[in-house]
Amino acid sequence: MLNPPRVYVTRRIPDAGLNMVRPACDVALWPGDEPPPYETIIDEAREADGLLCLLTDRIDAALMDAAPRLRVISQYAVGVDNIDLAAATRRGIVVGNTPDVLTDATADMAFALLMAAARWLVEGVKYARAGRWRTWGPLTLLGQDIHGATLGIVGLGRIGQAVARRARGFDMRVLYHDCQRSAAAEREFGPSCTDLDTLLAESDFVTLHVPLTPQTHHLIGAAQFRQMKPTAVLINTSRGPVVDQEALVAALRAGTIGGAALDVTDPEPLPADHPLLALPNAIVTPHIASASVSARNQMAVRAADNLLAGLRGELPPFCVNPEALENRATRDA
């Protein structure tokens, strides 16, 4: 009887996915809540046929070279910027991700952050808990209107479109900037395509929904903050390095913009003494945009489906480098 394929899972994921993998594979699972060290992943990958990893894990060419049996990398996330895709493709290693299932959960979180920042929700909770709420005050914690405001969406992919749909319920004017114009989205829910400069200048709220690439690294920095309204709020649920964080801190301190609400930072996690965590006009949450029970279970199922398909020599259902299968055939010939 053939031995089952060996897989290494770099963090515990919901049982909805693990229970699919365990009967078919010899599973080694990192037991800690913190990410495994890079050296540990290399050691575990040496005899592994598959990896199920998270976006916190660095999966580079050196690691792949140390894992000659590796056939599939299944990412428990949509973004794959932590994986050297070119190196995986050259080596015939298919890579899968988990798109679509976290779209609505992330859009919900983006809108929740927008509303919390607009209405000083976090500061209001602190105010009440600190015993400062002595009476109703006409000028206490005055925020910005959401209904009728202008929302600028940078990146009108699945999540950006979901945010635009939510904005309709608040009668918001929606602008978007994307490398590709979406006539279908414009017909369906009415966002207007514009250049980034115009979007920044006219928006009351700017929400980021772009992947992290060399082109989007520090897409929003000091120059962009100067273009925004002094009352504007920046929301980021994409990737931390899309924003120049030092420039953001400076803009928040100087009042160049009104506020920021971030579910992603650079680095993650932020040090406890990071200035962003002390600024009253900044909200920081610990990368929980997809943290609904339904979304995380569906992510686990898709990650398991991708892993098992790759181990069978098939194209994972959510594969980001399908050309790797051809290279594998050449490698194994």
Image (tube, grey):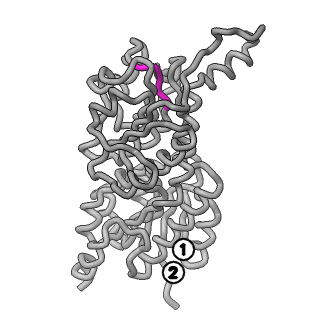
Instruction: Classify 197 as above or below 333.
Output: above
Q: Amino acid at mark 1?
A: Asp
Residue 295 figure quarter: bottom right
Tag shown at residue 4: 2
Q: In the image, what residue type sits under mark 2?
A: Pro
* Residue stretch in magenta: 257-261
Residue 86 picture location, percent across and down: 24, 61
Establish if 86 lies above or below 130. Answer: below
Query: Residue 301: image x %, image y %?
Result: 56, 67
- Residue at 47 percent across and 63 percent down: it is 52
- Does residue 285 appear left or right of residue 248 in this picture? right
Q: Using the image, tell me which numbered label, if any, was put on residue 26.
A: 1
Whether residue 22 sits left or right of residue 329 in the image: it is: right
Q: Nearer the viewer, residue 114 or 288?
A: 114
Q: Is residue 248 magenta?
A: no
Judge by depth and name the residue closer to the eye, 96 or 162: 162
Quadrant position of the C terminus in the picture:
bottom left
* Image location of residue 294, percent across then percent down: 63, 58
Query: What SS does tag 1 mark?
Result: strand
Contact (Cβ within 8 Å) of mark 1 with mark 2: yes
